[in-house]
Amino acid sequence: MKELLTDIIDWTNKNSGFLGLLIFFLTILISWISGLFEYIKKRPKFKIEIIENATFGCIIDLNETYKDLPVNKTAFAIYLEVTNIGNAPSSIGKINLGYLLSDMKPKWRTSRNWIAETFSKSDFRIEFKNSNIVRGFPFLKQANELHGKVDTYLEVGKSANGIVYFEQSEAYGSWMPRLNKDLKTTDLVIKIEDAFGKFHKKKFTIELVEPNYSLKFSPYFGQTQKEYFIEKEKEEKKE
């Protein structure tokens, strides 16, 4: 044992330059690894909740055909609450909504169509029965007449809530949400990007409603790209 220690001491004395260089590189490596782990640990994490009282979707039959298939317009109002439960602040970035195509394939084989958030021409409001009170809902990312603009920069532990509106272009065939067995709900995935480019997802089920119901919340629902119902009302008034 004594001889081994003597040999180690002799070797280190003869190779002190190499050991110093080795220690230098090991120090850099350990510092880099420590910094990397610290960077990985400090990340935002969005908890996404769906508020149901103003969350719905609607498939609007446009009474037109293309290639002998009916043409439709699909739109969604999703009332979100987003909470940063991570350990670093971040802003809410792009938001996309995905639905399963209404084709004949099994769910695990079919594709998911993604719709980007869309600007809504009107606020979302609801009138209470037997009352003159009107309640307005905030938008998550666009300005609102009653509520102004929601702060979407989320410190750790902070939340923001509001409606995100999605409107698909005119479509036909299987390009519409797949109905569940109850024939009135559909399964969706919402995807929110943070300032670091990381995506936060939430799977959920919502009810599909009739156009008249959606228009009670917003007279321009499903009509950002073209004012179907507004034009019809104008024509009826002229007659």
Image: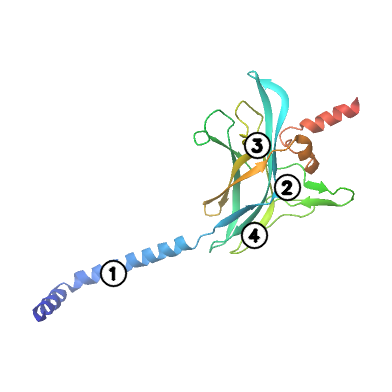
Marks 4/2: CA distance?
18 Å
Question: Which corner quadrant of the image does residue 85 belong to?
Answer: bottom right
Which label number is shown at residue 54? 2
Q: Residue furthest top?
A: 68
The label on residue 159 is 4
**Callout 1 touching callout 3 (CB < 8 Å):** no
Could you tell me which secondary element the residue under label 3 belongs to? loop
Farthest left residue?
Answer: 3
- C-alpha span from label 3 to label 4: 33 Å
Distance, label 3 to label 2, CA atoms, is: 21 Å
* Foreground of the two, 7 or 229: 229
Crowd class of label 1 (few under 14; some 14 to 19; many from 20; radius 10 Å) = few
State the quadrant of the N terminus. bottom left
Query: What residue is shown at x 79% (from left), y 47% (from top)?
Result: 125
Residue 41, position in %: x, y?
46, 63
Q: Position of residue 206 (x, y in %)?
A: 66, 43
Q: Against 204, is 18 above or below? A: below
Query: Mark 1 highlights which residue?
Result: 24
Return the residue at label 3. 182
Contact, mark 4 vs mark 2 (Cβ under 8 Å): no
Residue 230 x %, y % = 81, 33
Q: Residue at x 70, y 56 (%)?
A: 150
* Image marks 4 and 1: residues in contact by CB distance under 8 Å: no
Comparing labels 3 and 4, the label whose residue is closer to the camera: 3
Mark 4 nearby-residue class (10 Å; few <14, some 14–19, many ≥20): some
Q: Secondary structure at mark 4?
A: strand
Q: Are marks 3 and 4 in contact (CB under 8 Å)?
A: no
Circles 2 and 1: CB atoms closer than 8 Å: no
Q: Name which residue type carries label 3.
A: Asp
Q: Earlier in the sequence, mark 4 or mark 2?
A: 2
